[in-house]
Amino acid sequence: MKSLFQYIYLYRPLLAFIFVFGVCYSSSSVAQIQADPENLGTLGIQKFDTRTLSMGSATLADVYGRASIGVNPSLSGLYESSSDLQINGYHNWDHNLMQFNLTLPTMQAGGHHITARLGLIQAGSNSFNYLGSPTLPEPELDQYQAAFAYAYALNKEFSVGLLQNISYTSNNTAQYWTYSSDFGIVYAPEKSITYGLSFRGLGRETTYEIIETGETTLGSALSTQSLEVGATVRFPTEKRTYLSISFANEKRFGEDGLWYKGGIELLPYSFIAVRSGAMFNFSESVYIPRFGLGYNAKFVRLDYMVAPKKFSDEHFHQIGLTVKF
């Protein structure tokens, strides 16, 4: 049986090409707008599913929890079933932006797996913001997204994947196309523990500025690149799993320190899940808690999570629906 490092060595030309392409692409241009940080924002595309967010965004190695392709594009290569349809709805209380994602069932041919995700970001209705008025300026824009993940399973234990994301953002003043890509691997030597790695942010992302007249102008900037490694532990695996723990370390290039992530899922009954997670950055003295619940029926799974901490775009909630075919 070949080890993880042997597979990395065998596929080093492919990995080198992906990283060189991303670096060259990202270095080809610079940010196009500069503004007061109070009125300047980045349209952070919410790539993660509701369950992952409630567990501190730490599930990049969770093969059995069906994390979304944005967490780690290689995960779908090892899914036991690939016919689930996933819908997520996100609302940020600070700037009143809403996002909707639809992830289609994975198409499989041998070891090849292709998954598509469609998304929309737009300003939310003030009637939705039941916690009070937004604390940040509300941008006027619409963004349409399309993401495609390709995963290749070398065997039942090892998978590599690549995510391509295209977005189109527009309002009355401008239109912008942006592109980014992520790369990931997952290694599952046994059912009780799995390991994952992801490199994200090769490309550009849309930015916006709210000027003195109240209008929203658009631009683009290099995406924040990050390297993340982590693992997921499940217990027990012989019968029904009632405990899942995920943890990860993420280095965001250009920022001080590391982000430490951890999440736990308890399943006291087969149909209910209680989740909690947190993100730490000791260099920045930042602690971000998250919480969530899940209801699992025979053909559907309903998830809800909330991020109550008002820090760096971390005051939001999200609801998710998974339909099992």
Image: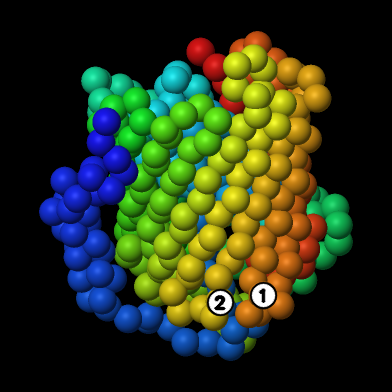
- Tell me the tag on residue 68: none
Residue under circle 2? 257
Decide: is 320 above or below 55: above
Pointer 1 with pointer 2, Cβ within 8 A: yes
**Dot 1 amino acid type:** Phe
User: Residue 250 placed where, x, y %?
Assistant: 51, 63
What is the tally of numbered marks visible in this picture? 2
Q: Earlier in the sequence, mark 1 or mark 2?
A: 2
Disc 1/disc 2 C-alpha distance (Å): 7 Å
Residue under circle 1? 282
Q: Residue at x 39, y 74 (%)?
A: 221
What crowding class fits label 1: few (fewer than 14 Cα within 10 Å), some (14-19), or many (20 or more)?
few
User: Residue 279 placed where, x, y %?
Assistant: 66, 61
Decide: is 184 above or below 255: above
Query: Which quadrant of the structure image shows residue 2?
Result: top left
Q: Is residue 94 visible?
A: no
Secondary structure of the residue carrying tag 1 is loop
